[in-house]
Image (cartoon, grey):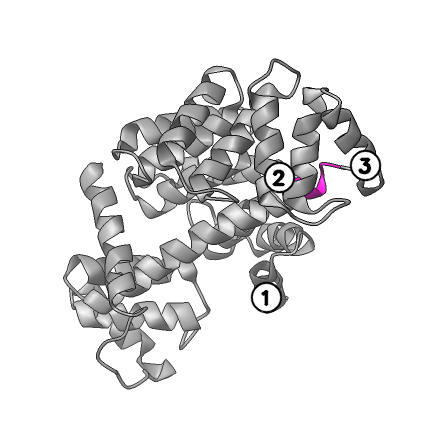
Amino acid sequence: MKKSLKYLYSIIFIWTLSGCGVGVVLTPPEPSQFSQYKSDCTGGDASACYILGNMYRDGVGTSKNEYQAKKAYKKACQNNESQACGELGKMYTENKEKSSVRGKQIKHESENLNASKFEMVKQTCDNGNNAECYKLGRMYERAIGTRKNYFKAFKVYKISCETQNTNTMKACYALGRFYKEGLGIRRNYSRAEKLFKHTCKNNETKGCSELGSMYLYGHGVEQNAMLGIQLLEKGCKHNNVKACTTLGTLFVTGEGVKEDYDRAHNYFDKACSNGDALACFNMGNMYENGIGRAQNKENAKEFYSVACRAGLKESCHSLENLQ
């Protein structure tokens, strides 16, 4: 398992060093050559697999298919085709960023913090009601009723985390995120790890998910893929969509675990049901391309529609292509 994840790191590292895939310039393939490159790739030609990945990625001679592009790049990379490693690393990095940003955007929309109550919440926090300090931190972090100010958000999260109140664990989790991401303060993985451990033990399972990601990818801690997956599963069990979507991606790509499309489907389905647009998009992709399920374009359209309405442009494009 560690070997597989080290392979993932190597492709991201190669992509970074190579200037996002700078290498030998190849003549763009013709659409009519798709079948030949696919056949050559099946026969073990790494260069053909790299070109096949490009064709799937760009929709040349076939429909765009990110999943098949990754498979082709992965096969080429395993046979020392460095440009394929770069493209695969780029795709994993971009998907990770999309997952974290879009999942949060959907969630924040449901928080219903009233901008007109900012002064009242601030006054209540200033007067010693530390439960309200957590809400104030959210307002500073999200620019609700005030300008965005990460440093002020950090300060009030810290106050709320260090006292016993109804929002203690939520504040400690937020504080851990700030240390992990370096929001308004210097990044400190050690403090982030401690806070996520603290919140995970006290049933704030978002902390389990963040901690799981740190162990899975070795972000500021010693890599422990098995523990990372266990923590992500705990988070997903308690409906943390980020954890479910991450697990779904792992079981589709086979990074760190054995490929299991049924489990991937279930994880994506759960995350989608709980409001994660990227998971809905992935479900649509599985149905459109018959990955782990019989191909069903009507089901694909439904999932793409959900993700599109949530603001995921890629899903809107996929929906248009199907229609």
Choose mark 2 or mark 1, whichever is in front: 2
- In the picture, residue 150 is in which quadrant? top right
- Residue 198 rendering spot, x and y as whole percentages: 45, 19
Instruction: Write down the residue under mark 1.
Output: 317
- Compared across the picture, whether 129 is left or right of 212 comes to right
Q: Position of residue 199 (x, y in %)?
A: 49, 21
| Front of the two marks 3 and 1 | 3
Measure the C-alpha gap from mark 2 to mark 3. Answer: 14 Å
Amino acid carrying mark 2 in the image: Lys
Residue at x 48%, y 27% (from the top left corner) = 207
Give the position of the N terminus as an image quadrant.
top left
Sooner in the amino-acid sequence: mark 2 or mark 3 = 3
Numbered disc 1: secondary structure: helix
* Vertical order, 195 against 47 (above or below): above
The amino acid type, in three-letter code, at marker 3 is Glu
Q: Position of residue 123 (x, y in %)?
A: 79, 29
Magenta part of the chain: 107-112
Q: Earlier in the sequence, mark 3 or mark 1?
A: 3
316 lies above or below 5: below
Q: Which residue is under mark 2?
A: 152
Disc number for residue 69: none
Q: Is residue 299 magenta?
A: no
Which residue does the numbered mark 3 point to in the structure image? 119
